[in-house]
């Protein structure tokens, strides 16, 4: 008597996003959470654009029409990132253009961008390159206004 392996195809039933995470509920009760930085198109999309998605292939994948992003559930389970998550456009000398990096502690609500800020997270943090919709650190905001003067 032999035992054969049954392949189960993971299917999404629901999708949620926050400022920095993509959360997918699966038909078998599991919930996957991955950083949005893995998918730059979604990271840079508005809340409304991220909210408009549809399940494709009976839940095998997710499609966001307004940002032209498709993600497979099997890929999420493998830890696959978007090809667009590789370094972005380079200038003529092959250097990456400067990108402002916003950081928020894993259990925090406030975003920081100034690495000289006393509260700038250096471990256990989320990163994004788009301006966060939630609150920015007061110290970072003051530095930003002073730099513009």
Image (spheres, rainbow, N blue to C red):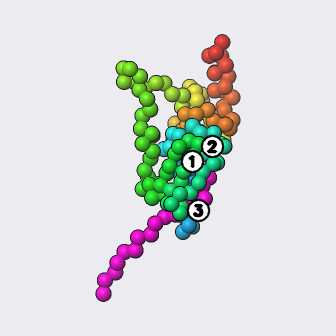
Can residue 86 be seen in this snapshot?
A: yes
Q: How far separated are the C-alphas under marks 2 and 1?
A: 7 Å
Which is more foreground, mark 3 or mark 1?
Answer: 1
Q: Is 111 above or below relative to 63?
A: above
86 lies left or right of 14: left
Magenta stretch contains residue 141:
no
Question: Where are the magenta residues, as a range?
Answer: 1-21
Q: Residue at x 59, y 42 (%)?
A: 66
Residue 64, disc: 1
Q: Position of residue 48 (x, y in %)?
A: 66, 43
Crowding near the residue tagged with mark 2, few <14, some 14–19, many ≥20 C-alpha atoms within 10 Å: some
Residue 49, disc: 2
Crowding near the residue tagged with mark 1, few <14, some 14–19, many ≥20 C-alpha atoms within 10 Å: some
Crowding near the residue tagged with mark 3, few <14, some 14–19, many ≥20 C-alpha atoms within 10 Å: some
Do the numbered discs 2 and 1 sit on residues whose CB atoms are within 8 Å?
yes
Q: How far separated are the C-alphas under marks 3 and 1?
A: 15 Å
Closer to the N terminus: mark 3 or mark 2?
3
Q: Nearer the viewer, residue 36 or 116?
A: 36
Closer to the N terminus: mark 2 or mark 1?
2
Residue 13, disc: 3
118 lies left or right of 76: right
Q: Where is residue 124 in the image (x, y as percent from the top left)?
A: 53, 44
Q: Is mark 1 on a helix, strand or loop?
A: strand
Can residue 107 be seen in this snapshot?
A: no
Which quarter of the rendered picture does the N terminus lie within? bottom left
Q: Residue at x 66, y 31 (%)?
A: 137
């Amino acid at each position: 008597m032999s035992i054969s392996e049954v392949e189960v195809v993971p299917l999404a039933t629901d999708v949620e996003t926050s400022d920095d995470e993509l959360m997918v509920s699966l038909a078998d009760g599991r919930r996957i959470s991955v950083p949005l930085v893995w998918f730059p198109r979604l990271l840079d999309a508005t809340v409304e654009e991220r909210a408009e998605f549809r399940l494709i292939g009976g839940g095998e994948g997710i499609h966001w029409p307004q940002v032209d992003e498709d993600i497979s559930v099997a890929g999420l389970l493998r830890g696959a990132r978007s090809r667009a998550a590789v370094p972005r456009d380079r200038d003529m000398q092959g250097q990456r253009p400067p990108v402002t990096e916003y950081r928020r502690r894993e259990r925090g609500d406030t975003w920081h961008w100034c690495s000289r800020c006393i509260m700038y997270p250096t471990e256990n943090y989320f990163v994004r390159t788009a301006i966060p919709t939630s609150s920015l650190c007061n110290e970072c905001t003051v530095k930003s206004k002073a730099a513009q003067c």
